[in-house]
Image: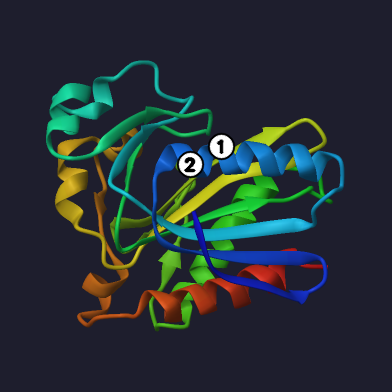
């Protein structure tokens, strides 16, 4: 795992931007290690930003593999991995062109619903900087633009109120991957990207900077 950039300009929150594409299993182990360190206060609150190699993940909300379309073996034959994860939520896709954020935080306000809404509001603020009106559905976690989901959210809370997993914002993601599954188990909404909504290309680094700015305003004390 290559560290593209490590920022410590905000004392209560460290931001780590990983270079290249990170396999999901590697990021999962990284999070588990950081959660242990955060419980012991050996590291500060940390936000990881990265892109994954193509992978379909299934969260704890999934009762079975029904939302994986034609099944695990078929998805693997397309060149993607499949992981059953300990995060919340159902099936989703991670891959190039998608910014994934993994906040490892000790929650000061011990309210899981507030944390999820704060993550949504962070992404909504990022979208607003591009002139887009994002919104969160009262029945589903995540962020939408119009009738299409642009950001999936699935988290885990460990003892000590330490968070892991997080959000996945589609910037220039190949949406054909999502056609292979039922994203987040939701059939009535489609999926979109930032570039599709804007009708132009957007540098990932530029979006990461906006995420860092909006995230630190909301979560750094």
Measured as percent of width and height from the top left, residue 215 is found at 63, 68
Please give the name of the residue rendered at 50% of the width and 68% of the height, measured from the top-left corner: 124
Eyeballing the image, is 94 above or below 174?
A: above
Please give the name of the residue rendered at 47% of the width and 55% of the height, measured from the top-left corner: 136
The residue under label 1 is: 29
Eyeballing the image, is 45 above or below 36?
A: below
Q: Is 204 situated left or right of 54 in this image? A: right
The image quarter containing residue 199 is bottom left
Please give the name of the residue rendered at 31% of the width and 80% of the height, measured from the top-left corner: 202
Q: Is 66 situated left or right of 168 in this image? A: left
Quadrant location, the C terminus = bottom right
Please give the name of the residue rendered at 78% of the width and 30% of the height, measured from the top-left corner: 159
The residue under label 2 is: 26
State the residue in front, 87 or 123. Answer: 87
Would you say the residues marked 1 and 2 are in contact, meaning their CB atoms lie under 8 Å apart? Answer: yes
* Local crowd size for mark 2, using a 10 Å CA cut-off: few (<14), some (14–19), many (≥20): few
């Amino acid at each position: 795992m290559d560290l593209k950039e490590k920022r410590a300009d905000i004392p209560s929150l460290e931001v780590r931007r990983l270079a290249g594409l990170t396999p999901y299993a590697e990021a999962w182990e990284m999070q588990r290690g950081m959660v242990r360190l955060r419980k012991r206060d050996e590291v500060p609150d940390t936000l990881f930003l990265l892109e994954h190699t193509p992978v379909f993940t299934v969260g704890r909300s999934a009762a079975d593999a029904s939302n994986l379309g034609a099944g695990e073996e078929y998805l693997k034959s397309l060149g993607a991995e499949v992981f059953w994860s300990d995060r919340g939520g159902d099936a989703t896709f991670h891959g190039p062109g998608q910014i994934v954020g993994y906040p490892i935080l000790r929650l000061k306000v011990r309210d899981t619903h507030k944390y999820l809404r704060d993550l949504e509001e962070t992404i909504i603020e990022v979208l607003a900087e591009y002139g887009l009106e994002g919104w969160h559905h009262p029945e589903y976690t995540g962020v939408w633009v119009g009738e299409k989901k642009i950001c999936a959210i699935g988290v885990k809370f460990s003892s000590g109120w330490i968070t892991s997993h997080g959000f996945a914002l589609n910037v220039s993601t190949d949406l054909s991957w999502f056609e292979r599954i039922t994203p987040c188990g939701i059939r009535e909404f489609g999926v979109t990207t930032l570039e599709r909504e804007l009708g132009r290309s957007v540098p990932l680094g530029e979006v990461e900077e906006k995420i860092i700015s909006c995230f630190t305003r909301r979560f750094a004390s």
